[in-house]
Amino acid sequence: MLLLAGLWPGSLAALVLGLAVGGFTGLPARPAIPAALGVATLALAALAIAGIVPGVQGFWLESAVAILVSYLAGCALGALARRSARVRPHDPPTS
């Protein structure tokens, strides 16, 4: 909890950046890319939670995981917002 108390500005910035990136790019064409990012994030989170990496490097890992999770959540929310806000194209004008 202390880590999040110190990193909330960075996590908030990562979330906002992720919202913008996800809103501009939308959902990826292939689902393998988000799945691979999710697996990599879970592996890094497990490594951080297990405490295998000690000292300053462990703090860096925990910080990176917290910010990466915020960024990826923002990307997913932005992409879903773009998808749900998509307006149906109008019929072409007849002349």
Image (cartoon, helix red, strand yellow):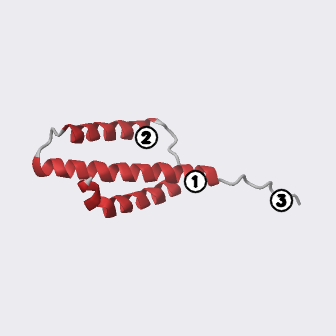
Q: Residue at x 37, y 62 (%)?
A: 13
SS class, disc 2: helix
Q: Left of 84 or right of it: where is 49?
A: left
Q: Mark 3 is on which residue type?
A: Pro
Q: Nearer the viewer, residue 68 or 51?
A: 51
Q: Nearer the viewer, residue 22 or 89?
A: 22
Q: Nearer the viewer, residue 53 or 4?
A: 4
Percent across and percent down for residue 46 are 26, 37
Q: Earlier in the sequence, mark 3 or mark 2?
A: 2
Q: Which residue is mark 3?
A: 93
Q: Left of 75 or right of it: where is 40?
A: left
Percent across and percent down for residue 17 are 41, 60
Q: CA distance from mark 1 to mark 2?
A: 17 Å
Q: Is residue 27 above or below residue 30?
A: below
SS class, disc 1: helix
Q: Is residue 14 above or below residue 50?
A: below
Q: Residue at x 22, y 42 (%)?
A: 48
Q: Earlier in the sequence, mark 1 or mark 2?
A: 2
Percent across and percent down for residue 45 are 28, 41
Please tell me in which quadrant of the rendered image residue 44 appears. Answer: top left
From the image, which quarter does the C terminus lie in?
bottom right
Q: Nearer the viewer, residue 55 or 29?
A: 55
Q: Residue at x 51, y 54 (%)?
A: 78
Percent across and percent down for residue 91 are 80, 54
Q: Is residue 18 above or below residue 36?
A: below
- Farthest residue in the left direction? 55
Q: On residue 34, which mark appears?
A: 2
Q: Residue at x 58, y 53 (%)?
A: 82
Q: On residue 63, which mark appears?
A: none
Q: Which residue is mark 1?
A: 82
Mark 3 Cα shell of 10 Å, populated few (<14), some (14-19), many (≥20): few
